[in-house]
Amino acid sequence: DTGVSQNPRHKITKRGQNVTFRCDPISEHNRLYWYRQTLGQGPEFLTYFQNEAQLEKSRLLSDRFSAERPKGSFSTLEIQRTEQGDSAMYLCATQTSGRGFGPGTRLTVL
Amino acid sequence: GQQLNQSPQSMFIQEGEDVSMNCTSSSIFNTWLWYKQDPGEGPVLLIALYKAGELTSNGRLTAQFGITRKDSFLNISASIPSDVGIYFCAGHGTGANNLFFGTGTRLTVIP
């Protein structure tokens, strides 16, 4: 058990809608990461938090994406005006020995 | 970005056989990690390697961090049906906070 939960596990939305995902580490972890995984590929880095501060963002994170970690514990990832290309598994991870991933949120944009 | 080539892309083996897969990078990594992912789930860490030349085992799994720091391999001995899944290598370089993942090796074990 990596101690990371993600909600919802699945989300189906229509193109143009906004969606928000949540990541909850069970215990306090300074570092929290978001990754995106499309079918047949490995996860790709999106962004990284050290406590509340968002320290690094990938070029994959367009201006329609925003992530927050307001109290240095849980984190949210919002996608505005979703596009079909946003369909993917969104994974949250914390810094343990290696990287402990949550079960992911699978987003389908119709 | 950094390129990680993982091979083979897929494998079909008989239960009880040994499996070997590897990963090569276009640049030097300071850490190599191997993950297994089941359908609809996040990747689960199997083995972490932190030093060039390091050979580490976890049950029937053995992984090595290549001396050049640009490659790693994972061996699974005496495969069983629950070994089925997609295996990913991952690594990151000095000071990097993001992991780079390979494209995965899909393992099928035939009972």
Image (cartoon, coloured by chain):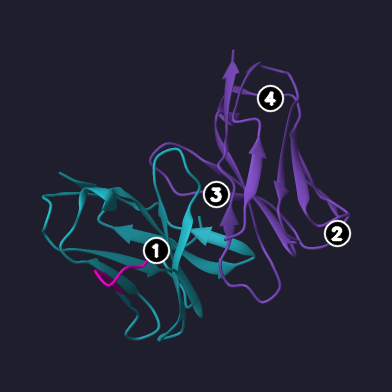
Chain colours: A cyan, B purple
Q: What residue is shown with label 4?
A: B79
Per the rendered image, the range of residues in magenta is: A60-66
Q: What residue is shown with label 2?
A: B52
Q: How many marks?
A: 4
Q: Main secondary structure of the magenta part?
A: loop
**Secondary structure of residue under mark 3:** strand
Q: What residue is shown with label 1?
A: A60
Nearer the N terminus, badge 3 or badge 4?
A: 3
Q: Which amino acid does label 1 sit on?
A: Leu
Quote the CA–CA distance across marks 2 and 3. 23 Å
Q: In this view, does B66 lie to the left or right of B8?
A: right
Q: Is residue B25 above or below residue B96?
A: above
**Secondary structure of residue under mark 1:** loop
Subunit of label 3: B
Q: What residue type is labelled 4?
A: Ser
Q: How crowded is mark 1: few (under 14 residues within 10 Å), some or many (20 or more)?
A: few
Is residue A5 shown to the viewer in this render? yes
Residue A102 image point, x, y percent: 43, 57
Q: Which residue is drawn at 50% across and 68% down?
A: A94
Q: How crowded is mark 4: few (under 14 residues within 10 Å), some or many (20 or more)?
A: many
Subunit of label 2: B
Quote the CA–CA distance across marks 1 and 3. 23 Å
Q: Residues within 10 Å of mark 3 (few under 14, many from 20)?
A: many
Residue A96 image point, x, y percent: 59, 67
Q: Residue at x 64, y 49 (%)?
A: B4
**A64 drawn magenta:** yes
Q: What residue is shown with label 3?
A: B44
Quote the CA–CA distance across marks 2 and 1. 31 Å
Quote the CA–CA distance across marks 3 and 4. 18 Å
Residue B13 image point, x, y percent: 65, 17
Q: Closer to us: mark 4 or mark 2?
A: 2
Q: Is residue A50 above or below residue B16?
A: below
